[in-house]
Image (tube, grey):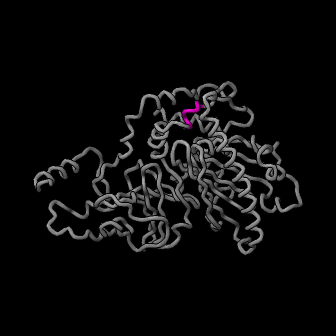
Amino acid sequence: MATARSLAALLSARATRPGPRRAGGAWPPRFAARAAAEPEHARRLVAEFDPAVPLEAAVTPPSGWYTDADFLRLELDRVFLRGWQAVGHIWQVKNPNDFFTGRLGNVEFVICRDANGNLHAFHNVCRHHASILACGSGQKTCFQCPYHGWTYGLDGTLLKATRISGIKNFNKNDFGLVPVKVATWGPFVLVRFDDESTEGDVGDVVGDEWLGSASKLLSTNGIDTSLPHICRREYIINCNWKVFCDNYLDGGYHVPYAHGALASGLQLQSYETLTYERVSVQRCESAPSESDDLERLGTKALYAFVYPNFMINRYGPWMDTNLAVPLGSTKCKVVFDYFLDKSLLDDQNFIERSLRDSEQVQMEDIALCEGVQLGLKSPVYSIGRYAPSVEMAMHHFHCLLHSNLSS
Protein backbone atom coordinates (compact mmCIF):
# COMPACT_ATOMS: atom_id res chain seq x y z
CA MET A 1 0.00 0.00 0.00
CA ALA A 2 1.47 3.35 -1.01
CA THR A 3 1.85 5.94 1.74
CA ALA A 4 0.37 9.40 1.32
CA ARG A 5 3.86 10.77 0.83
CA SER A 6 4.79 8.24 -1.85
CA LEU A 7 1.43 8.76 -3.59
CA ALA A 8 1.97 12.50 -3.64
CA ALA A 9 5.44 11.99 -5.05
CA LEU A 10 4.06 9.71 -7.75
CA LEU A 11 1.36 12.16 -8.76
CA SER A 12 3.88 14.98 -8.78
CA ALA A 13 6.21 13.00 -11.04
CA ARG A 14 3.36 12.26 -13.46
CA ALA A 15 2.29 15.89 -13.52
CA THR A 16 5.80 17.02 -14.46
CA ARG A 17 6.32 14.60 -17.30
CA PRO A 18 7.43 16.29 -20.52
CA GLY A 19 4.71 17.35 -22.95
CA PRO A 20 1.75 19.73 -22.91
CA ARG A 21 -0.99 19.34 -20.34
CA ARG A 22 -4.30 18.33 -21.86
CA ALA A 23 -7.54 20.13 -21.12
CA GLY A 24 -9.09 16.88 -19.94
CA GLY A 25 -6.35 15.84 -17.57
CA ALA A 26 -2.76 14.86 -17.09
CA TRP A 27 -2.47 11.62 -19.03
CA PRO A 28 0.65 11.50 -21.20
CA PRO A 29 -0.44 12.75 -24.63
CA ARG A 30 2.00 10.76 -26.72
CA PHE A 31 0.53 7.32 -26.04
CA ALA A 32 1.67 6.33 -29.51
CA ALA A 33 5.28 6.68 -28.40
CA ARG A 34 4.99 3.21 -26.89
CA ALA A 35 5.55 1.86 -30.40
CA ALA A 36 8.69 3.93 -30.94
CA ALA A 37 10.99 0.98 -30.37
CA GLU A 38 9.58 -1.03 -33.27
CA PRO A 39 11.45 -4.23 -34.19
CA GLU A 40 14.29 -3.98 -36.65
CA HIS A 41 12.67 -6.46 -39.02
CA ALA A 42 9.63 -4.17 -39.40
CA ARG A 43 11.94 -1.37 -40.53
CA ARG A 44 13.62 -3.75 -42.95
CA LEU A 45 10.25 -4.66 -44.42
CA VAL A 46 9.54 -0.97 -45.02
CA ALA A 47 12.88 -0.57 -46.81
CA GLU A 48 12.16 -3.49 -49.16
CA PHE A 49 9.75 -1.29 -51.11
CA ASP A 50 11.32 1.50 -53.17
CA PRO A 51 8.87 4.30 -54.08
CA ALA A 52 11.48 5.96 -56.31
CA VAL A 53 11.27 3.17 -58.90
CA PRO A 54 8.87 4.16 -61.72
CA LEU A 55 5.59 2.29 -61.85
CA GLU A 56 6.57 0.44 -65.02
CA ALA A 57 9.61 -1.09 -63.29
CA ALA A 58 8.33 -1.20 -59.70
CA VAL A 59 7.64 -4.30 -57.65
CA THR A 60 4.91 -4.45 -55.04
CA PRO A 61 5.63 -4.38 -51.30
CA PRO A 62 6.78 -7.72 -49.87
CA SER A 63 4.25 -10.13 -48.42
CA GLY A 64 5.46 -9.29 -44.91
CA TRP A 65 3.62 -5.96 -45.20
CA TYR A 66 0.42 -8.02 -45.14
CA THR A 67 1.23 -10.78 -42.65
CA ASP A 68 3.61 -9.45 -39.99
CA ALA A 69 2.15 -8.43 -36.61
CA ASP A 70 5.01 -6.06 -35.79
CA PHE A 71 4.54 -4.34 -39.13
CA LEU A 72 0.90 -3.70 -38.25
CA ARG A 73 1.96 -2.18 -34.92
CA LEU A 74 4.23 0.16 -36.83
CA GLU A 75 1.34 1.10 -39.14
CA LEU A 76 -0.94 1.85 -36.22
CA ASP A 77 1.61 4.27 -34.78
CA ARG A 78 2.89 5.88 -37.98
CA VAL A 79 -0.24 5.81 -40.15
CA PHE A 80 -3.45 5.59 -38.13
CA LEU A 81 -2.50 7.64 -35.07
CA ARG A 82 -1.28 10.55 -37.18
CA GLY A 83 -3.37 12.96 -39.23
CA TRP A 84 -7.12 13.04 -39.77
CA GLN A 85 -8.95 9.71 -39.75
CA ALA A 86 -12.54 9.13 -40.87
CA VAL A 87 -14.47 7.35 -38.12
CA GLY A 88 -18.16 7.89 -38.88
CA HIS A 89 -20.81 10.19 -40.33
CA ILE A 90 -22.84 13.13 -39.09
CA TRP A 91 -26.12 11.19 -38.99
CA GLN A 92 -24.69 9.19 -36.07
CA VAL A 93 -24.46 12.36 -33.97
CA LYS A 94 -27.27 14.36 -35.55
CA ASN A 95 -29.05 15.26 -32.30
CA PRO A 96 -27.94 16.47 -28.86
CA ASN A 97 -26.91 13.53 -26.60
CA ASP A 98 -26.18 11.24 -29.58
CA PHE A 99 -22.96 9.24 -29.33
CA PHE A 100 -21.06 6.42 -31.00
CA THR A 101 -17.90 4.53 -30.10
CA GLY A 102 -15.01 3.06 -32.02
CA ARG A 103 -11.63 1.38 -31.70
CA LEU A 104 -8.42 1.79 -33.67
CA GLY A 105 -5.63 -0.52 -32.57
CA ASN A 106 -5.53 -0.16 -28.79
CA VAL A 107 -7.23 3.24 -28.86
CA GLU A 108 -10.85 3.28 -27.69
CA PHE A 109 -12.77 6.47 -28.48
CA VAL A 110 -16.23 7.95 -28.19
CA ILE A 111 -17.81 10.71 -30.30
CA CYS A 112 -20.75 12.64 -28.84
CA ARG A 113 -22.85 15.77 -29.21
CA ASP A 114 -23.64 17.59 -25.99
CA ALA A 115 -26.92 19.23 -25.02
CA ASN A 116 -25.78 22.50 -26.60
CA GLY A 117 -25.10 20.82 -29.93
CA ASN A 118 -21.30 20.88 -29.64
CA LEU A 119 -19.40 17.91 -31.07
CA HIS A 120 -16.78 16.23 -28.85
CA ALA A 121 -14.46 13.23 -28.98
CA PHE A 122 -12.70 11.52 -26.08
CA HIS A 123 -10.67 8.48 -25.24
CA ASN A 124 -13.35 6.04 -24.10
CA VAL A 125 -11.58 5.13 -20.87
CA CYS A 126 -12.53 5.92 -17.29
CA ARG A 127 -9.87 7.90 -15.44
CA HIS A 128 -10.38 5.83 -12.28
CA HIS A 129 -9.38 2.25 -13.15
CA ALA A 130 -9.42 2.26 -16.97
CA SER A 131 -12.80 0.65 -17.62
CA ILE A 132 -14.42 1.28 -21.01
CA LEU A 133 -17.18 3.82 -20.45
CA ALA A 134 -19.59 3.55 -23.38
CA CYS A 135 -20.42 0.81 -25.87
CA GLY A 136 -22.06 0.91 -29.27
CA SER A 137 -24.13 3.96 -30.09
CA GLY A 138 -27.29 5.71 -28.97
CA GLN A 139 -28.18 8.57 -26.65
CA LYS A 140 -26.82 9.48 -23.22
CA THR A 141 -27.00 12.56 -21.04
CA CYS A 142 -23.75 11.53 -19.35
CA PHE A 143 -21.22 8.70 -19.35
CA GLN A 144 -21.29 6.62 -16.17
CA CYS A 145 -18.57 4.06 -15.69
CA PRO A 146 -20.11 0.57 -15.32
CA TYR A 147 -17.33 -0.42 -12.91
CA HIS A 148 -17.40 2.10 -10.03
CA GLY A 149 -19.89 4.72 -11.15
CA TRP A 150 -17.58 7.64 -11.95
CA THR A 151 -19.69 9.95 -14.10
CA TYR A 152 -18.68 12.35 -16.86
CA GLY A 153 -20.54 15.04 -18.76
CA LEU A 154 -20.71 14.93 -22.55
CA ASP A 155 -18.14 17.74 -22.49
CA GLY A 156 -15.72 15.40 -20.71
CA THR A 157 -15.99 17.00 -17.27
CA LEU A 158 -15.82 14.65 -14.29
CA LEU A 159 -19.20 15.18 -12.62
CA LYS A 160 -19.01 12.60 -9.85
CA ALA A 161 -16.29 10.40 -8.36
CA THR A 162 -17.91 7.91 -6.00
CA ARG A 163 -16.67 6.92 -2.54
CA ILE A 164 -13.48 8.99 -2.54
CA SER A 165 -13.86 10.53 0.89
CA GLY A 166 -10.44 10.80 2.49
CA ILE A 167 -8.57 10.90 -0.80
CA LYS A 168 -5.64 13.32 -0.87
CA ASN A 169 -3.92 15.23 -3.66
CA PHE A 170 -6.96 14.90 -5.90
CA ASN A 171 -8.37 17.65 -8.10
CA LYS A 172 -11.34 16.42 -10.10
CA ASN A 173 -10.59 19.01 -12.80
CA ASP A 174 -7.50 16.95 -13.59
CA PHE A 175 -9.54 13.79 -14.12
CA GLY A 176 -11.92 14.66 -16.91
CA LEU A 177 -12.01 12.50 -20.02
CA VAL A 178 -8.95 12.87 -22.25
CA PRO A 179 -10.06 14.74 -25.37
CA VAL A 180 -9.43 13.85 -29.00
CA LYS A 181 -9.55 16.46 -31.74
CA VAL A 182 -12.72 16.09 -33.83
CA ALA A 183 -14.11 17.81 -36.90
CA THR A 184 -16.50 17.23 -39.79
CA TRP A 185 -16.10 17.56 -43.54
CA GLY A 186 -19.25 17.16 -45.59
CA PRO A 187 -21.15 14.24 -44.05
CA PHE A 188 -18.07 12.67 -42.44
CA VAL A 189 -16.81 12.76 -38.85
CA LEU A 190 -13.02 12.87 -38.50
CA VAL A 191 -10.65 12.61 -35.56
CA ARG A 192 -6.92 12.99 -35.11
CA PHE A 193 -4.98 11.55 -32.20
CA ASP A 194 -1.71 13.42 -32.74
CA ASP A 195 -2.99 16.97 -32.18
CA GLU A 196 -3.11 18.17 -28.60
CA SER A 197 -5.36 21.16 -29.31
CA THR A 198 -9.11 20.72 -28.92
CA GLU A 199 -10.14 23.89 -30.72
CA GLY A 200 -12.37 23.17 -33.68
CA ASP A 201 -11.24 23.79 -37.25
CA VAL A 202 -13.56 25.08 -39.94
CA GLY A 203 -14.49 22.69 -42.72
CA ASP A 204 -12.24 24.25 -45.35
CA VAL A 205 -9.17 23.87 -43.14
CA VAL A 206 -9.99 20.25 -42.36
CA GLY A 207 -10.72 19.57 -46.01
CA ASP A 208 -7.38 20.99 -47.08
CA GLU A 209 -5.52 18.91 -44.48
CA TRP A 210 -7.48 15.70 -45.10
CA LEU A 211 -8.09 15.85 -48.85
CA GLY A 212 -5.56 18.36 -50.16
CA SER A 213 -6.23 19.59 -53.69
CA ALA A 214 -8.87 16.86 -54.19
CA SER A 215 -11.20 18.68 -51.79
CA LYS A 216 -12.84 20.81 -54.50
CA LEU A 217 -13.31 17.86 -56.87
CA LEU A 218 -15.09 15.81 -54.23
CA SER A 219 -17.22 18.64 -52.89
CA THR A 220 -18.48 19.43 -56.41
CA ASN A 221 -19.29 15.81 -57.28
CA GLY A 222 -22.10 15.12 -54.88
CA ILE A 223 -20.07 14.38 -51.73
CA ASP A 224 -22.21 16.51 -49.44
CA THR A 225 -24.48 16.48 -46.42
CA SER A 226 -27.80 16.36 -48.29
CA LEU A 227 -28.02 12.58 -48.68
CA PRO A 228 -29.81 10.82 -45.80
CA HIS A 229 -28.21 7.73 -44.30
CA ILE A 230 -30.03 4.53 -45.24
CA CYS A 231 -28.20 1.70 -43.50
CA ARG A 232 -24.89 0.27 -42.32
CA ARG A 233 -23.39 -3.13 -43.01
CA GLU A 234 -20.22 -4.52 -41.47
CA TYR A 235 -18.05 -7.36 -42.73
CA ILE A 236 -15.29 -9.22 -40.89
CA ILE A 237 -12.82 -10.31 -43.56
CA ASN A 238 -9.91 -12.70 -43.09
CA CYS A 239 -7.37 -10.47 -44.80
CA ASN A 240 -5.00 -7.65 -43.99
CA TRP A 241 -6.70 -4.25 -44.25
CA LYS A 242 -4.42 -3.30 -47.16
CA VAL A 243 -5.56 -6.30 -49.22
CA PHE A 244 -9.05 -4.81 -49.24
CA CYS A 245 -7.65 -1.38 -50.19
CA ASP A 246 -5.46 -2.85 -52.94
CA ASN A 247 -8.49 -4.60 -54.41
CA TYR A 248 -10.32 -1.27 -54.47
CA LEU A 249 -7.38 0.50 -56.11
CA ASP A 250 -6.65 -1.74 -59.11
CA GLY A 251 -8.40 0.54 -61.60
CA GLY A 252 -11.20 -1.89 -62.33
CA TYR A 253 -8.67 -4.58 -63.32
CA HIS A 254 -10.57 -7.35 -61.53
CA VAL A 255 -14.10 -6.22 -62.40
CA PRO A 256 -14.66 -8.20 -65.64
CA TYR A 257 -13.27 -11.37 -64.04
CA ALA A 258 -14.94 -11.20 -60.61
CA HIS A 259 -18.02 -8.99 -61.00
CA GLY A 260 -19.84 -10.05 -64.14
CA ALA A 261 -23.11 -8.32 -63.28
CA LEU A 262 -21.37 -5.06 -62.33
CA ALA A 263 -19.11 -5.17 -65.40
CA SER A 264 -22.13 -5.34 -67.70
CA GLY A 265 -23.27 -1.96 -66.39
CA LEU A 266 -19.94 -0.15 -66.84
CA GLN A 267 -17.85 0.99 -69.80
CA LEU A 268 -14.57 -0.31 -68.45
CA GLN A 269 -12.60 1.20 -71.33
CA SER A 270 -13.59 4.62 -69.97
CA TYR A 271 -11.88 4.00 -66.60
CA GLU A 272 -9.54 6.80 -65.59
CA THR A 273 -7.44 7.38 -62.48
CA LEU A 274 -6.40 10.69 -60.94
CA THR A 275 -3.97 10.97 -58.02
CA TYR A 276 -3.63 13.81 -55.54
CA GLU A 277 -1.58 14.30 -52.37
CA ARG A 278 -3.46 11.79 -50.18
CA VAL A 279 -6.37 10.92 -52.44
CA SER A 280 -6.87 8.93 -55.61
CA VAL A 281 -10.00 9.11 -57.74
CA GLN A 282 -11.19 6.50 -60.23
CA ARG A 283 -13.98 7.40 -62.63
CA CYS A 284 -15.94 5.25 -65.04
CA GLU A 285 -18.93 5.81 -67.32
CA SER A 286 -21.94 3.53 -67.24
CA ALA A 287 -22.82 1.36 -70.22
CA PRO A 288 -25.91 2.30 -72.27
CA SER A 289 -28.78 0.35 -70.78
CA GLU A 290 -32.53 0.30 -70.42
CA SER A 291 -32.35 -1.88 -67.34
CA ASP A 292 -32.49 -0.99 -63.67
CA ASP A 293 -28.66 -0.76 -63.66
CA LEU A 294 -28.81 2.72 -65.17
CA GLU A 295 -31.20 3.86 -62.47
CA ARG A 296 -28.87 2.56 -59.75
CA LEU A 297 -25.46 3.37 -61.28
CA GLY A 298 -26.33 6.62 -63.05
CA THR A 299 -24.32 7.76 -66.05
CA LYS A 300 -20.95 7.98 -64.31
CA ALA A 301 -19.42 6.48 -61.19
CA LEU A 302 -16.76 8.09 -59.02
CA TYR A 303 -14.63 6.06 -56.60
CA ALA A 304 -12.45 8.11 -54.25
CA PHE A 305 -9.85 6.61 -51.94
CA VAL A 306 -8.81 8.83 -49.03
CA TYR A 307 -5.57 7.65 -47.45
CA PRO A 308 -5.16 5.54 -45.48
CA ASN A 309 -8.38 3.49 -45.34
CA PHE A 310 -11.53 5.39 -46.40
CA MET A 311 -13.41 4.95 -49.67
CA ILE A 312 -16.23 7.10 -51.06
CA ASN A 313 -18.34 5.79 -53.94
CA ARG A 314 -20.76 8.11 -55.75
CA TYR A 315 -23.00 6.68 -58.46
CA GLY A 316 -26.47 7.65 -59.62
CA PRO A 317 -28.60 8.57 -56.59
CA TRP A 318 -26.36 6.59 -54.23
CA MET A 319 -23.30 7.28 -52.17
CA ASP A 320 -21.68 4.57 -50.12
CA THR A 321 -18.54 4.63 -48.04
CA ASN A 322 -16.18 1.86 -46.99
CA LEU A 323 -13.93 2.07 -43.95
CA ALA A 324 -11.28 -0.67 -43.61
CA VAL A 325 -10.30 -1.07 -39.95
CA PRO A 326 -7.42 -3.39 -39.03
CA LEU A 327 -8.29 -6.06 -36.44
CA GLY A 328 -4.99 -7.91 -36.75
CA SER A 329 -2.31 -8.55 -39.33
CA THR A 330 -4.60 -10.96 -41.22
CA LYS A 331 -8.07 -9.71 -40.29
CA CYS A 332 -10.02 -6.50 -40.80
CA LYS A 333 -13.48 -5.06 -40.42
CA VAL A 334 -14.96 -3.15 -43.34
CA VAL A 335 -17.84 -0.81 -42.53
CA PHE A 336 -20.22 0.12 -45.36
CA ASP A 337 -22.55 3.09 -44.97
CA TYR A 338 -25.21 3.78 -47.61
CA PHE A 339 -26.69 7.19 -48.40
CA LEU A 340 -29.44 7.96 -50.92
CA ASP A 341 -31.03 10.92 -52.67
CA LYS A 342 -34.09 12.13 -50.78
CA SER A 343 -36.34 11.68 -53.81
CA LEU A 344 -36.04 7.88 -53.56
CA LEU A 345 -36.45 7.37 -49.83
CA ASP A 346 -39.97 5.96 -50.24
CA ASP A 347 -39.05 3.53 -53.04
CA GLN A 348 -38.40 0.46 -50.93
CA ASN A 349 -38.24 -1.88 -53.92
CA PHE A 350 -35.48 0.20 -55.47
CA ILE A 351 -33.57 0.40 -52.18
CA GLU A 352 -33.78 -3.34 -51.52
CA ARG A 353 -32.80 -4.21 -55.08
CA SER A 354 -29.84 -1.83 -55.01
CA LEU A 355 -28.60 -3.13 -51.66
CA ARG A 356 -28.95 -6.70 -52.89
CA ASP A 357 -26.82 -5.90 -55.95
CA SER A 358 -24.22 -4.21 -53.74
CA GLU A 359 -24.18 -7.20 -51.38
CA GLN A 360 -23.39 -9.50 -54.30
CA VAL A 361 -20.36 -7.36 -55.21
CA GLN A 362 -19.16 -7.37 -51.58
CA MET A 363 -19.39 -11.16 -51.32
CA GLU A 364 -17.40 -11.50 -54.53
CA ASP A 365 -14.75 -9.08 -53.24
CA ILE A 366 -14.51 -10.84 -49.88
CA ALA A 367 -13.80 -14.13 -51.62
CA LEU A 368 -11.06 -12.44 -53.67
CA CYS A 369 -9.47 -10.75 -50.66
CA GLU A 370 -9.44 -13.85 -48.50
CA GLY A 371 -7.93 -15.84 -51.37
CA VAL A 372 -5.18 -13.24 -51.77
CA GLN A 373 -4.41 -13.36 -48.03
CA LEU A 374 -3.96 -17.13 -48.21
CA GLY A 375 -1.59 -16.67 -51.14
CA LEU A 376 0.41 -14.02 -49.29
CA LYS A 377 1.21 -16.62 -46.62
CA SER A 378 2.59 -19.02 -49.21
CA PRO A 379 6.38 -19.62 -49.07
CA VAL A 380 6.60 -19.20 -52.85
CA TYR A 381 5.28 -15.63 -52.92
CA SER A 382 7.24 -12.57 -51.89
CA ILE A 383 6.67 -9.68 -54.32
CA GLY A 384 4.54 -9.02 -57.38
CA ARG A 385 4.30 -6.44 -60.17
CA TYR A 386 1.93 -3.64 -61.13
CA ALA A 387 -0.13 -3.37 -64.32
CA PRO A 388 1.06 0.14 -65.29
CA SER A 389 -2.01 1.13 -67.29
CA VAL A 390 -4.51 0.52 -64.46
CA GLU A 391 -2.83 0.12 -61.06
CA MET A 392 -1.56 3.68 -60.60
CA ALA A 393 -3.74 4.33 -57.56
CA MET A 394 -2.50 1.19 -55.85
CA HIS A 395 1.12 2.22 -56.36
CA HIS A 396 0.27 5.71 -55.07
CA PHE A 397 -1.18 4.12 -51.91
CA HIS A 398 1.95 2.06 -51.33
CA CYS A 399 4.18 5.10 -51.79
CA LEU A 400 2.16 7.05 -49.21
CA LEU A 401 2.49 4.17 -46.76
CA HIS A 402 6.24 4.01 -47.31
CA SER A 403 6.54 7.72 -46.65
CA ASN A 404 4.68 7.48 -43.34
CA LEU A 405 6.41 4.31 -42.22
CA SER A 406 9.86 5.70 -42.99
CA SER A 407 9.33 8.91 -41.04
Q: Residue at x 63, y 47 (%)?
A: 305
> For the magenta stretch, what is the residue range?
61-66
Q: Residue at x 75, y 63 (%)?
A: 354
Location of residue 142 (image quadrant): bottom left
Location of residue 346 (image quadrant): bottom right
Please check the rendered image and state whether residue 136 is part of the magenta-colored stretch, yes or no: no
Tell me: residue 354, above or below residue 326: below
- Residue closer to the observer: 167 or 197: 167
Please check the rendered image and state whether residue 64 is part of the magenta-colored stretch, yes or no: yes
- Residue closer to the observer: 167 or 213: 167
x and y percent of residue 352 in the render? Answer: 74, 67
Tell how many labels: 0
Residue 255 is left or right of residue 89, and the answer is right
- Residue closer to the observer: 379 or 132: 379
Q: Residue at x 56, y 62 (%)?
A: 89
Tell me: residue 286, above or below residue 120: above
x and y percent of residue 16 in the render? Answer: 21, 47
Residue 354 is left or right of residue 50, and the answer is right
